[in-house]
Image (tube, rainbow, N blue to C red):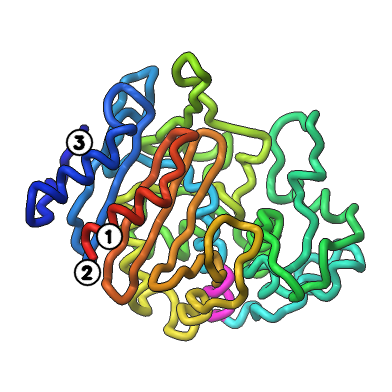
Amino acid sequence: MIHDVPIHAGDHNRAGAIAALMQRYDGAVPGASLLVLRDGEPLVRRGFGLSDLEQGTEAGPATNYRLASVSKQFTAASILLLAQDGALSVDDPLSRWLPSLPPATRGITLRHLLTHTSGLVDYEDLMGDDWQGQIRDAGVLELLEREDRLYFPPGSDYRYSNGAYALLALIVEEASGLAYPEFLRQRIFEPLGMHDSIAYVAGGPDVPHRAWGYSADGKGWKRTDQSTTSAVLGDGGIYSSIDDLARWDAAMYDDRLLSDASRALAFAPHVRVTGEPYEASYGFGLRITGDTVWHSGETIGFRNVMVRWPEERLTVVLLSNRNDPEPYETALRIGALFL
């Protein structure tokens, strides 16, 4: 274990409670990195277990995990930045930017994509079980170009859509003239000092301090770092660390990146979430539940969550390189220790 910032929560009971909640991640097993921030100051900042079983590398504050759907808030922020630039509007029709999509999609706007109210068919279901290699964002577009149907009329219902966020990444490229990873680097990561965060593309820059994903197979842990959908960037392809996400969290409280109006849009409860095992509304790349703003991320070998209590200026980030357990409830229980 790495204790870069000791747990100084005020009493041993709180430290003991955190140790008990994180026990499954500790030892010679795929691990996790945990961050608790209040008013931008780390109260807990440490790693548990291993980021690389084969090399015996300990997880720590700088370990980079594939964020999976925690990435969606960065895709949404990219669209909002371009709206601030005047390069696009969140109410633009999808057809303005991706005119090759079939007639059934003509009523979709970027706002529908951002809030999972587009009705787009799930691209994962269009791939089939025998898909060879890895699909990318452009491949998602190619699949949807052949699908002249929607689940429901745009804006009439909610259905979580990874494909919507893959299309948003392509729209960022169209509107900015930059490859999506480069847009993120120039407009978000570098300005905020998130120097180790990256939208990973095979053959491009390596992920620094990389955690490798694992799944329990009944006999131990098996490396399961990539799937056929792991190369799609807009819906889940960013790698980051708790240290870099602390910088991202700080930017959500002021206008250093997004204007007050843009942040209000991102955090607004645009639609009620349905079909998922919790009560929430959806903003732009963010879920809103009571006094929390949050998003989880789940992909082969990784489970992550970032939960913010804005009124309390409290944030809990829990990133893990394993398929189990799901960390949302753990993060809520850790957060409750500081409320």
Specify the segment rendered in magenta. Answer: 78-85
Residue 289: x and y in percent read: 46, 68
Q: Earlier in the sequence, mark 2 or mark 3?
A: 3
Residue shown at 48%/85% (left/top)? 261
Q: Earlier in the sequence, mark 2 or mark 1?
A: 2
- Where, quadrant-wise, is the N terminus in this rendering? top left
Is residue 221 shown left or right of residue 121?
left
Q: As rendered, which of 13 and 311 lies closer to the eye? A: 13
Identify residue type, mark 2. Asp
- Where, quadrant-wise, is the C terminus in this rendering? bottom left
Identify residue type, mark 3. Ile
Q: Earlier in the sequence, mark 3 or mark 1?
A: 3
Residue at label 3?
A: 2
Pointer 3 local density, CA inside 10 Å: few below 14, some 14–19, many at least 20: some
Residue 173: x and y in percent read: 65, 61
Residue 171: x and y in percent read: 68, 65
Residue at label 2?
A: 39
Identify residue type, mark 1. Ala
Vertical arrangement, residue 93 with respect to residue 11, above or below: below
Report the residue that reaches farthest toward the left.
11
Instruction: Provide the secondary structure element on which disc 3 rests.
Output: strand
Residue at label 1?
A: 336
Q: How many marks overall? A: 3
Report the residue that reaches farthest toward the top.
219
Q: Nearer the viewer, mark 3 or mark 1?
A: 1
Instruction: Provide the secondary structure element on which disc 2 rests.
Output: loop
Magenta segment, prevailing SS (helix, strand or loop): helix
Q: As rendered, which of 131 and 34 lies closer to the eye? A: 34
Instruction: Provide the secondary structure element on which disc 1 rests.
Output: helix
